[in-house]
Amino acid sequence: MQSPVPAILQLLRLPVMPIVSIHELDRAVPLARALVEGGVSVFEVLLRTPVALQAIEAIRRHVPEATVGAGTLLAAADVQRAIDAGGHFGVSPGLVPDLAQAALDKQLPLLPGVWTASEVMQAMAWGFQTLKLFPANGLDGVRQIEHLQAVFAQARFCPTGGIRPEHVRSYLALRSCQAVGGSWMTPQPLVAARDYAAITALAREALQWAAPPQ
Ligand code: 3PG
């Protein structure tokens, strides 16, 4: 079976990845359009709300420019749900065998979560080399990636969890950092208020944080 690694690396082509919680289905499409408008067309929708799968379906149908991941995959059944909704890729906070096997069997590009060296070794043993570093917790993840990348030359990391925009540049300066993820680009008060222009502005600002200093 073909390794999922090249696919996930191609999909995570932007330096920042919004992590989106959608509580009301009517927010899904305009929110996705707002992110695309801001230049950030790759994002993750967390499967932690009742409408998350419908939101992914709606975004796939109405916002073809978007590359949408399904987040918080915990078990094999979640892989099938992500595929059925049309998710381009999956994201998991950690990795367990049935989840890994399902993603490989069903060829869903998966970004599995790790923090320790042993977790990196387990993920790599399954063939996953592009890994979510979770929870990054501010700049703690920078130190962690520095240690891990020294040992695992092939690994690529996407830190998420507790990252602020001002941390983005420190992460992207690391050789092995592929993209930085977080919910700061889609804060719930702005989503609730339907302030999509502000979300577009946050997406643009995130790309500016990601740009190398002049
Ligand atoms: C994740 O899944 O990485 C987190 O839920 C997102 O974390 P944040 O809200 O701290 O950005």
Image: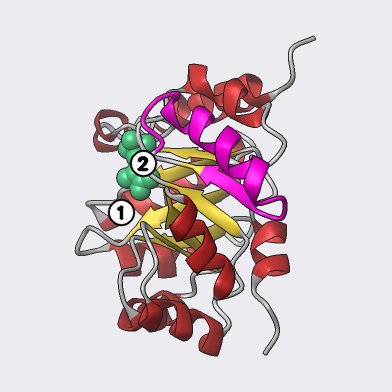
Q: Mark 1 to mark 2: distance in Å?
A: 30 Å
- Range drawn in magenta: 136-158
Residue at horizontal 57 percent and vertical 43 percent from the top: 148
Q: What residue is shown with label 2?
A: 135
Residue drawn 46% across the image and 33% down it? 141
Asked if 155 appears above or below 203 in the picture, the reply is below
Mark 2 vs ligand 1: CB under 8 Å? Answer: yes
For this orientation, the residue located farthest to the right is 214
Q: Residue at x 45, y 85 (%)?
A: 102
In the depicted view, which residue is nearer to us: 51 or 80? Answer: 80
Could you tell me residue 189's position as x and y percent? 24, 29
Q: Name the residue under label 1.
A: 26
Q: Is 171 colored magenta in this rendering?
A: no
> Is label 1 in a helix, a strand or a loop?
helix
Using the image, determine if residue 95 lies above or below residue 145. below
Total labels: the figure holds 2
Q: Callout 2: helix, strand or loop?
A: loop
Left/right of residue 214 with respect to residue 210 in the rendered view: right
Amino acid at dot 1: Asp
Looking at the image, the residue that sits furthest to the top is 214
Three-letter code, disc 2: Pro
Q: Does the magenta stretch include residue 137?
A: yes
Q: Residues within 10 Å of mark 2 (few under 14, many from 20)?
A: some
Q: Quadrant of the C terminus?
A: top right
> Looking at the image, can residue 56 be seen?
yes
Q: Residue 86 location in percent, x, y?
A: 49, 75
Give the quarter the ligand 1 occupies: top left
